[in-house]
Image (tube, coloured by chain):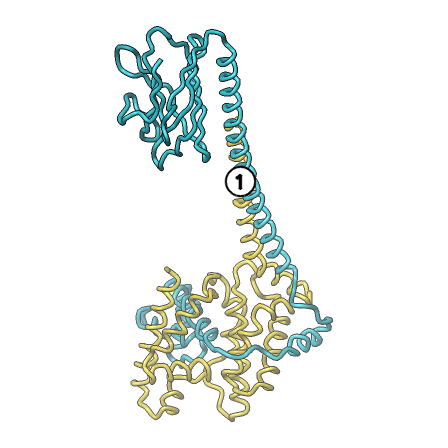
């Protein structure tokens, strides 16, 4: 018989239920080294194993394990063996690595936040130092704005030719989302020049320093407008503060 | 300031990744090797290895034997006999190339069917069952045949067979009947039974191939 004719019989051969003469035919093919039949029988063992493993049943009685061990002269031992210990050790090691990475990530995030905070505070401190320097200078010129108005922002502008411009304001509401305050140096002739972005605090106060030399003789006014976050090169709205020099 | 920290973080991530990359194959190697090591220990007559073998396959073997003999007390005896037979014959088993699960199930099935034959006064068929459980028969079997998903697939396929096909296959496997004996038991012509068995096996074979290539 050919291998093709024997192919359907491989599983029965493996099960031991194939009858003669087919059984003898398969046996002869295998014993003569027939590769097709040998491979087919190997595959048939997988099918037969799956048939056996498909038999569902209850767990064996608890005492059977001990009985088996006793029959080979061994004392019962827990099912918890080294294989399990290896698995647990590997799981713990992986968990430790994951935890380490997580802790490092958390620490890095916290450090970044702290650095940002320190950076902000350093900038504020530098701004205050610049403001104090500007205020102490005898060349500084002071202008008030908003006086006599019921609600609008009020405050003072200090202009120093070598240190720049200091704006101190109150009654300045916090800018809406997506907006920021932008200060402008408005010359007597020409277009306003941007002089930095700032926001007011929750109490409506704001302090902003523009640190660059300015020409007192050429400045007509200091103004503040509400602009899109990130600022603009030329004012797009009416000033909320205007202090004429 | 940010660059060194990012570099440190990168180093730790690379270290963790490397550790995982090293650990995982190691873990898998341990798992994959465990059965081979277990067999080596069985060959070294380590009785605790027998306990571990039982922990791995005891439920499967008991389920199969109980299905064949349908008596819990007899099943217990036959399961014990199965593992003792494996214990006594493991020296001939190729630890590197053999698949122990299929071997154990073959021993268990033969013990259970022998019991049926002895107590049911059935004639032993023309087939020599001893041949079907020789350790050499289980060399070079791929380990993936014991994958539970493949077994589940075949189990489902078995349930989907036509009733006659399923009965014929079950009589062949769980009772060890030849096709002639199945035909007598079912009161059907031998040719019809052969067709049922052939179609059922084709179906199961197809499912198994599909499962292994999945």
Q: Please give left or right for residue A128 compared with residue B39 in the image.
A: left
- Which structural element holds mark 1? helix
The image shows residue A170 at horizontal and vertical percentages of: 43, 28
Picture quadrant of residue A148: top left
Q: Chain of mark 1?
A: A
Q: Label 1 neighbourhood size at 10 Å, few (<14), some (14-19), many (20+)?
A: some
The answer, for residue B26, to whether it is visible in the render is yes
The image shows residue A97 at horizontal and vertical percentages of: 57, 45
Chain shown in yellow: B
Colour seen for chain A? cyan
Q: Please give left or right for residue B132 compared with residue A92 in the image.
A: left
Q: Residue at x 68, y 66 (%)?
A: B48
Against A201, residue B163 (above or below) is below
Q: Residue at x 64, y 58 (%)?
A: A85
Residue nearer the viewer, A34 or A89: A89
Residue nearer the viewer, B9 or A19: B9
Picture quadrant of residue A238: top left
Q: Please give left or right for residue B181 compared with residue A107 in the image.
A: left
Residue nearer the viewer, B19 or A72: B19
Residue nearer the viewer, B201 or B153: B153
């Amino acid at each position: 018989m050919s291998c093709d004719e024997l192919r359907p019989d491989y599983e029965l051969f493996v099960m031991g239920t194939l009858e003669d003469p087919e059984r003898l035919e398969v046996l002869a093919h295998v014993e003569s080294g027939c590769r097709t039949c040998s491979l087919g029988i190997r595959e048939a063992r997988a099918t037969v194993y799956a048939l056996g493993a498909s038999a569902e049943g209850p767990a064996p009685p608890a005492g059977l394990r001990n009985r088996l061990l006793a029959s080979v002269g061994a004392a019962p031992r827990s099912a918890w063996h080294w294989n399990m210990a290896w698995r647990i050790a590997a799981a713990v090691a992986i968990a430790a690595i994951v935890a380490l990475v997580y802790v490092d990530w958390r620490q890095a995030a916290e450090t970044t936040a702290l650095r940002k905070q320190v950076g902000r505070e350093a900038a504020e401190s530098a701004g205050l130092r610049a403001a104090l320097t500007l205020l102490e200078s005898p060349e500084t010129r002071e202008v008030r704005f908003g006086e006599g108005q019921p609600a609008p922002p009020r405050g003072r502008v200090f202009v120093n030719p070598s240190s720049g411009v200091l704006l101190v304001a109150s009654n300045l509401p916090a800018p809406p989302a997506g907006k920021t305050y932008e200060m402008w140096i408005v010359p007597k002739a020409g277009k306003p020049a941007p002089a930095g972005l700032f926001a007011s605090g929750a109490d409506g106060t704001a302090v902003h320093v523009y640190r660059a030399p300015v020409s007192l003789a050429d400045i007509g006014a200091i103004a503040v407008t509400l602009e899109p976050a990130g600022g603009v090169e030329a004012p797009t709205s009416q000033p909320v503060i205007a202090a004429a020099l | 300031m940010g660059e060194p920290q990012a570099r440190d973080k990168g180093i730790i991530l690379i270290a963790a990744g490397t550790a995982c990359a090293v650990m995982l194959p190691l873990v898998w190697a341990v798992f994959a090797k465990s059965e081979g090591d277990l067999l080596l220990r069985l060959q070294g007559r380590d009785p605790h290895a027998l306990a571990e073998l039982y922990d791995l396959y005891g439920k499967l073997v008991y389920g199969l034997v109980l299905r064949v003999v349908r008596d819990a007390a007899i099943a217990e005896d036959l399961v014990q006999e199965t593992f003792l037979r494996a214990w006594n014959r493991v020296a001939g088993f190729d630890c590197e190339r053999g698949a122990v699960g299929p071997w154990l199930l073959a021993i268990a099935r033969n013990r259970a069917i022998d019991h049926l034959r002895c107590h049911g006064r059935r004639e032993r068929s023309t087939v020599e069952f001893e041949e079907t459980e020789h350790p050499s028969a289980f060399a070079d079997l791929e380990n993936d045949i014991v994958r539970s998903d493949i077994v589940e697939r075949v189990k489902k396929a078995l349930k989907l067979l036509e009733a006659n096909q399923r009965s014929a296959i079950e009589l062949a496997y769980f009772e060890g009947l030849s096709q002639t004996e199945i035909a007598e038991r079912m009161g059907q012509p031998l040719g019809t039974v052969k067709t049922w068995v052939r179609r059922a096996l084709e179906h199961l074979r197809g499912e198994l191939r599909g499962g292994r290539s999945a």
